Image (spheres, rainbow, N blue to C red):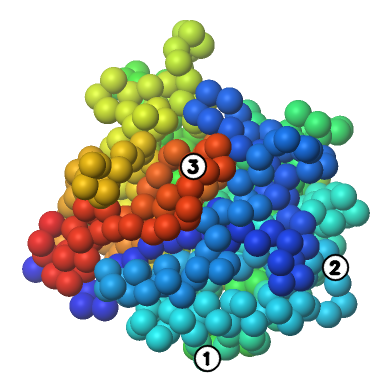
Amino acid sequence: MTKLAKDFLWGGSIAAHQLEGAWQEGGKGPAIMDYATSGSADTPREYTKEIEEGRRYPSHEGIDFYHRYKEDIALFGEMGFKSLRISIDWSRIYPNGDDDEPNAAGIAFYQSVVDELLKHNIEPIITLYHFELPMNLVTKYDSWKNRQLIEFYLNFVETMVQALKGKVKYWVTFNEMNHIDPQTEASDMFTYILAGLKYSELEGNKKEVLAVIGYNMTLAGVKATRLIHQLDPASKVGCVFGITPTYPVNCDPVNVLNAFKEMDRDFYQIDAMCNGEFPEYKLKEYQDLKIEVGLTKEDKQDFAEGQLDFIGMNYYMTDVARYKGSEEEEGSLFGGVQNPFLEKSVWGWGVDPIGLRYLLNYTYRRYGLPIIICENGLGAVDKVGLDGIVHDDYRIDFLQKHLSELKKAVEEDKVDCFGYLMWGPIDLVSATTGEMKKRYGFIYVDKHDDGTGNLSRSRKDSFYWYKNLIETNGEDL
Ligand code: BG6
């Protein structure tokens, strides 16, 4: 029987702006998420133009990973992590994005983080863009609307590949660029976290702006893939997508087709990065909308030569497509309706382990490329018990059920999945709400939304559960 590979990459994923803190140290410049306030499940984060007195900006301190990474990596090592996906904050390397020379202190920091990982036999997986865009590239160049950003991004990518060559094998060009698409009703949140622009403030034809941003990022992705391959032929390059499989509300063919179309929208960039060309169907769709993304002959070459080695998937939940007459229903994060067959997390995210198996199958059958689950996990409210320990059986239950479906996808459906990286193995700031209260970790961090807490780290029950799971390579689920 097919089994999980012996070298299956068990581990976790983190992102710089959600945990490093030290936002003005080591020569770092301001980046878009440094202007994102804390919010809550009911109060959206705000994205302010200036740092406003009296507001809280959680990226400024994060969980102080910048100063504590050795301690944190040692804990991941203790759990037996085979891999950790980190992101490199562009604004630590090029504080303004367009600087002539990189910031040596920023490079040294990430070299040291990578060395520390290797010391613990943890394979680093490096994301080169996880919502960390230098603010100057927004204010001076209009963000990804401007093709010039591609050159700045490639310069940054080259700097990091040269700096980490020989130590890093797996590179990820972008995290979740698929949340920008002209056909979806976009929100301020997604356009901001990806491009530092608020949807409500976009000028001109908004659909066109989103199409151009999406196109420029996709092109940057394939150019970066080709560049990394050239700089280091031993490298494996992927891109990470955040996909929410969408179900029809019932078997009415109209609803089935509608659900298919909604889900399919998230795949055009994967098509572009895997199939050697920017999809013709998307260009025709743009033509109908009178949208011009500026595809050139050279771009075509880039798409042909910048194909991915693997696909990274972030999976949290599934959605049910809106249907005629569903306007009154309570909406989900991605605009669909709630699924009555599923339980919801405290933050309203439908818990659907089978959706993970569905997504793995869907993606593998479509592209035939190796897949790594780059994020999955449960955001929950943790309470420290009287014994000083978080007893998070609900998190263990969530992970157990999801991993059991992942195993079925590999063992029964023969999907080539080579790793599972749990999101937020140490408590960190939520990207969507800016809270600390929404915790994912195996490791508890004493830090609270009102700014209190001594930042100490402690092991939750799930810490020992995951450690044992890794030790048995997923057998003891
Ligand atoms: C993913 C992002 O979409 O969702 C992460 O890549 C994010 O950055 C994760 O943290 C979970 O979202 P949240 O809001 O619960 O942190």
Residue 58 percent location from the top left of the image: 61, 46
Query: Of circles 2 and 3, which is in front?
Result: 3
Q: Amino acid at mark 2?
A: Asp
Q: Nearer the viewer, residue 439 or 352?
A: 439
**To which quarter of the image does residue 38 belong?**
top right
Q: Count residues near mark 1 (Cα–Cα under 10 Å), then give few for <14, some for 14-19, many for 20+.
A: few
According to the picture, the residue beneath numbered tag 2 turns out to be: 98
Q: Is residue 207 visible?
A: no
Query: Which comes before the other along the chain, label 1 or label 2?
Result: 2
Q: Is residue 177 visible?
A: yes
Query: Which comes before the other along the chain, label 2 or label 3?
Result: 2
According to the picture, the residue beneath numbered tag 3 turns out to be: 448
Q: Is mark 3 within 8 Å of ligand 1?
A: no
According to the picture, the residue beneath numbered tag 1 turns out to be: 166
Question: Which quadrant, please, contains the C terminus?
Answer: bottom left
Q: Count residues near mark 2 (Cα–Cα under 10 Å), then give few for <14, some for 14-19, many for 20+.
A: many
Q: Amino acid at mark 3?
A: His
Give the alpha-carbon distance from disc 2 to disc 3, as whole Å.
35 Å
Q: Is residue 48 left or right of residue 314?
A: right
Give the alpha-carbon distance from disc 3 to disc 1, as whole Å.
39 Å
Instruction: Report helix, strand or loop for mark 2.
Output: loop
- Looking at the image, which residue is at 82% across and 40% down? 49
In this view, 253 is above or below 301 = above
In this view, 103 is above or below 234 = above
Q: Amino acid at mark 1?
A: Gly
